[in-house]
Image (spheres, rainbow, N blue to C red):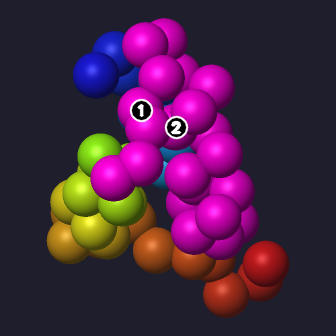
């Protein structure tokens, strides 16, 4: 995954899981379900979590 797409997706995940999944749909190429759920879990295990301020 290109670094800019990963940053966009990680930023969206920090605002909420649904926003993260929606951002994955906007990536080029798009990441669709169920793969988006796998990516969400992978990023969660990598330490990307929802910000407490959101």
The magenta region covers 11-34
Residue drawn at the location 48% of the way across and 12% of the way down:
28
Residue drawn at the location 49% of the way across and 49% of the way down:
10
Residue drawn at the location 29% of the way across and 46% of the way down:
35
Say which residue label 2 marks.
24
- Across and down, in percent, residue 54 comes to 79, 78
Magenta span contains residue 14: yes
Q: Quadrant of the N terminus?
A: top left
- Across and down, in percent, residue 19 comes to 68, 56
Say which residue label 1 marks.
31
**Within the image, what quadrant is residue 6 found in?**
top left
How crowded pointer 1 is (Cα within 10 Å; few <14, some 14-19, many 20+) is rated as some
Secondary structure character of the magenta stretch overall:
helix
- Would you say residue 41 is visible in this rendering? yes
Tell me: 18 left or right of 2.
Answer: right
Tell me: 15 left or right of 17.
Answer: right
* Distance between the alpha carbons at the discs numbered 1 and 2: 5 Å
- Across and down, in percent, residue 12 comes to 64, 52
Which one is earlier in the sequence, the residue at label 1 or at label 2?
2
**Number of marks present in the image shown:** 2
Residue drawn at the location 35% of the way across and 60% of the way down:
37
Q: Nearer the viewer, residue 53 or 43?
A: 43
Tell me: 36 left or right of 21.
Answer: left
- Across and down, in percent, residue 39 comes to 29, 51
How crowded pointer 2 is (Cα within 10 Å; few <14, some 14-19, many 20+) is rated as many
Is there CB contact under 8 Å for labels 1 and 2? yes
Magenta span contains residue 31: yes
């Amino acid at each position: 995954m290109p670094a800019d797409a990963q940053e966009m997706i990680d930023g969206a995940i920090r605002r909420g899981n649904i926003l993260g999944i929606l951002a994955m749909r906007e990536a080029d190429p798009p990441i669709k379900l169920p793969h988006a759920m796998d990516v969400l879990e992978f990023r969660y295990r990598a330490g990307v979590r929802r910000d407490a301020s959101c």
